[in-house]
Amino acid sequence: MAAMQIRPQPFFNNKNRAFWNLQSAGWAGALVLRAISGIANQVPLDFLVPVIISTITGYSISLLLSVVYKNLIHRKPLVMWGTTAFMLAIAAALFAFIDGWVFMILNPATEVGFGSLFLANLYVDITMLGAWSALYYAINYFLRVEEQNDQLMQLETQATRAQLAMLRYQLNPHFLFNTLNSISTLVLLRQTEPANAMISRLSSFLRHTLVNEVHSRVTLEQEVETLHLYLDIEKMRFEERLRPSFDIDPAVRDALLPSLLLQPLVENAIKYAVTPKEEGADISVSAKLNGDTVEIVVADTGPGKNGPVNTHASSTGVGLGNIQERLNQAYGEAHRFEIVSSAGGGFTVKIAFPFETREQIERKAIEDAQSSDPSANRGGYNEAIFGEHATNGEILPQPVDQLNAGSNPEPNSGNDTGSGAKPATSPAVATLQHKEI
């Protein structure tokens, strides 16, 4: 039988309960210490009566102080500490007066004067209430710092999401310009059938990309499906000059990655490998699992560049720099992004990032939710010490709706050469192939 997993609960998750636990445990501990001290000194057990009454008095006075401190916590330091010292002196004097009065009632034959009792009790009581006050403010300071850190994390998350959105929005104008320019050329040349097919494929591609939020992550299988839609459009422009192939390990099909991460790499390969060469070029996309890391390689047989280039030191083109920045935002240092080009031609981009599936993220989110106390009462009169804390939940990737079969071709597996309508070779094709940024 599987052992029940016990998840630790944050102590200050229910702030009201934490206050009462600390309040009760603290004064109970003081009672026990005073009782042990009396017993160790062989004091008659009837001394426990004034000790218990004194503890109840201190417990009650500290509750009154918490009401005052709650209203001082956000005041200016001079006002807060001045008022605190004043209230602490009054509370300690009241505490000492009650202790002395109780002792005089319980010991009417004592020869000790009330003044001496008051001064002796005042020293002890001001020490206890001073320690209680210091602990109260220390916990408040800790919770305020924690809340500010949570708010800062939220702001950083929002800033990261905004930056990721900005980076992804940079991808669309370039591609849209070339595609719309191609459609315009087809219309001018009265190539209505290819123009209509390209519009249909562009619509499918945009629909597929807009389903996903700009800051979300998609599975590698969905990303490859998006690449197929994109390549269907480009195949209409370059025909047999564009020869794509895919080799995707089934083990990484469910791996999550930022949406539209690979499309700029393929677009870059088309621009610098297919366009300059009359015979075109081969473009391969492969992905495999290496331990806990997903490794993706996008390679072409174009002219390439002279010598290897590491894009952590330099970046080539807006698209590659964009991808590098998105990887930095998504994975920090836990990724690799390399560009390799041989002297004989060919250009290869290698990406590696941690393997993570939607199920793993959802399971982690459920565990995080279960680790918090849903019955936490964040109100109460001691609101200052138990102020609201910002929570920073991870955004789960949203599932992508299935597209209509008529407008969304099934992604191929294994080695694939792409698909799409192939209009007959015409003068329009040569014109289309040179109308790009």
Image (cartoon, grey):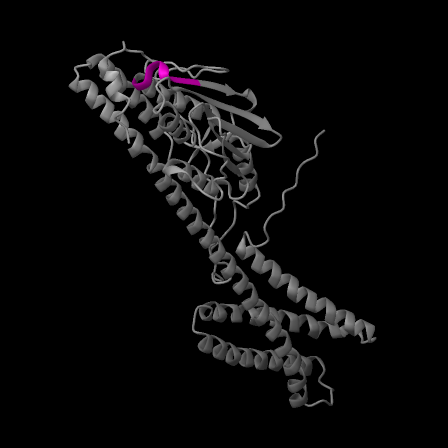
The residue at 24%/20% (across/down) is 431
Tell which of 179 and 373 is nearer to you: 179
Q: Report x, y in % for residue 122.
A: 63, 82
The residue at 24%/14% (across/down) is 194
Q: Is residue 340 left or right of residue 114?
A: left
| Above or below for 75 versus 217 | below
| Above or below for 173 versus 427 | below
Residue 280 showing in the rendered view: yes
Q: The magenta stretch spans which residues?
A: 237-244
Tell which of 220 and 132 is nearer to you: 220
Tell which of 228 and 88 is nearer to you: 228
Quadrant housing the N terminus: top right
Q: Report x, y in % for residue 242.
A: 38, 18
Q: Is residue 103 magenta?
A: no
Quadrant housing the C terminus: top left
Q: Report x, y in % for residue 211.
A: 35, 29
Task: State whether the magenta stretch is mostly helix, strand or loop.
Answer: helix
Q: Is residue 241 left or right of residue 380?
A: left
Tell which of 430 and 52 is nearer to you: 430
Residue 100 showing in the rendered view: no
Q: Report x, y in % for residue 337.
A: 50, 37
Q: Is residue 241 magenta?
A: yes
| Above or below for 29 versus 234 | below
The residue at 23%/16% (across/down) is 428
The residue at 40%/39% (across/down) is 322
